[in-house]
Image: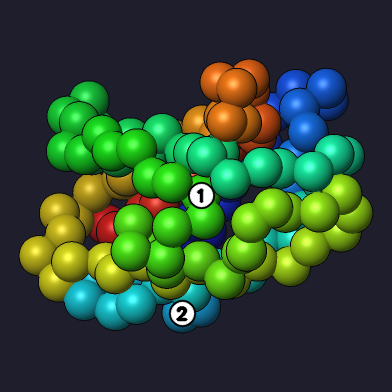
Amino acid sequence: MSAWHYVDTSSLSDPIQIQSIVIAPDPPKPGSDLKATIVARADREIEPGAYLDVTVKFGVVQVLHRTYDLFDPMDWSIDATAPLQKGDHTLGVVVRIPPTVAHTRCVVQIRGYTVNDEEMASLDVRLDFT
């Protein structure tokens, strides 16, 4: 098994369709900044107020559940500006991996919603720190 992979759990009717994700470093390393480059297509404009619900689990233990404003740089590190126009986009995201991360498998569930609470995109990222 590779050290990570993702599963796009979005519906074909969701306004954001993920085309690819590339990360660095690959494989992810505890104590480092994980930089993800996401290529996606917006089928319509995504307005300010869109948000992500993020859940992190190690095994069956949930260690984080947080909501992030998609466009708020104070919430997290993304290079998207609001509104996100219809069309193709390459987005950069930086996430800090704690140096004390457990030596096990981790699942990050990301569920995106529009300002009107409609499903926007959905994916599961699986990381293996064993």
- The answer to whether residue 29 is left or right of residue 20 is left
Residue nearest the viewer, comparing 65 with 68: 68
Tell me the distance, in whole angstroms, between the alpha carbons under discs 2 and 1. Answer: 23 Å
Q: Quadrant of residue 62?
A: top left
- The structure residue drawn at horizontal position 69% and vertical position 53%, both measured from the top left corner, is 83
Query: Is 68 placed above or below 73 here?
Result: above
Query: Is 46 placed above or below 80 here?
Result: above
Q: Amino acid at mark 1?
A: Leu
The picture places residue 107, in percent across and down from the top left corner, at 37, 40
Residue nearest the viewer, comparing 122 with 130: 122
Q: Quadrant of residue 100?
A: bottom left
Query: Is 108 placed above or below 38 here?
Result: above
Mark before the other along the chain sequence, 2 or 1? 2
The residue that mark 1 highlights is 70
From this viewpoint, is residue 99 visible? yes
The picture places residue 69, in percent across and down from the top left corner, at 43, 46
